[in-house]
Amino acid sequence: MNQDTLLMFTRNGLGDAPEGLRTAVTVKFLALLRQTGKLPGKIVFYTEGVKLVASGSLVVEHLRALEAAGVELIVCQTCLEYFGLLEQVAVGKVMGMPDVIAAMQSADKVISL
């Protein structure tokens, strides 16, 4: 595990492609990330990225496996409230923007996806 690396999901999937492709690429990315053995210390979800941790998301099981492997999943509370998803969080810790900022500032490497 690479404790000093933080991944940020700011979109509901990866890239600027149609939704189905974004989702498919995200599923593949998370599955392969788990297999590398070089996991980030934290993954942050904000803006539309919070949709990835909600019930019904096709990546929830992959995120649960990453969390079980020790990756901290931080989810923006304000963003969840905006999208009406606060009650639908299936994985991760709901935190405020100060926690998101602290996680970003403590990381040696921040990768925005």
Image: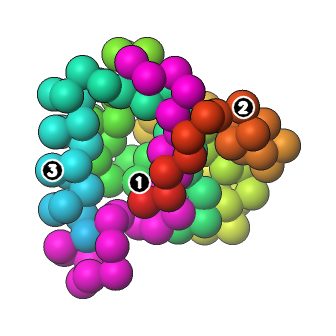
Of helix, strand and loop, which one carries label 1? helix
Judge by depth and name the residue closer to the eye, 71 or 4: 4
Residue 99, image quadrant:
top right
Q: Which of label 2 and label 3 is nearer to you?
A: 2
Relative placement, left or right, of 111 versus 75 is left
Viewport quadrant of the N terminus: top left
Q: Is residue 22 above or below residue 102?
A: below
In the image, residue 46 sits, relative to residue 95, either above or below, namely below
Asked whether the residues under the numbered discs 2 and 3 touch, taking CB atoms below 8 Å apart as contact, a structural biologist would say no
Residue at position x 46%, y 67% from top?
A: 11
User: Which SS class for mark 3?
Assistant: helix
**Residue 97 pos. (x, y %):** 79, 49
Q: Residue at x 43, y 30 (%)?
A: 40
On-image quarter of the C terminus: bottom left
Which badge, 3 or 1, is on the more N-terminal residue?
Answer: 3
Residue beneath disc 1: 52
Residue linked to disc 3 = 28
| Residue 112 visible in the picture | yes
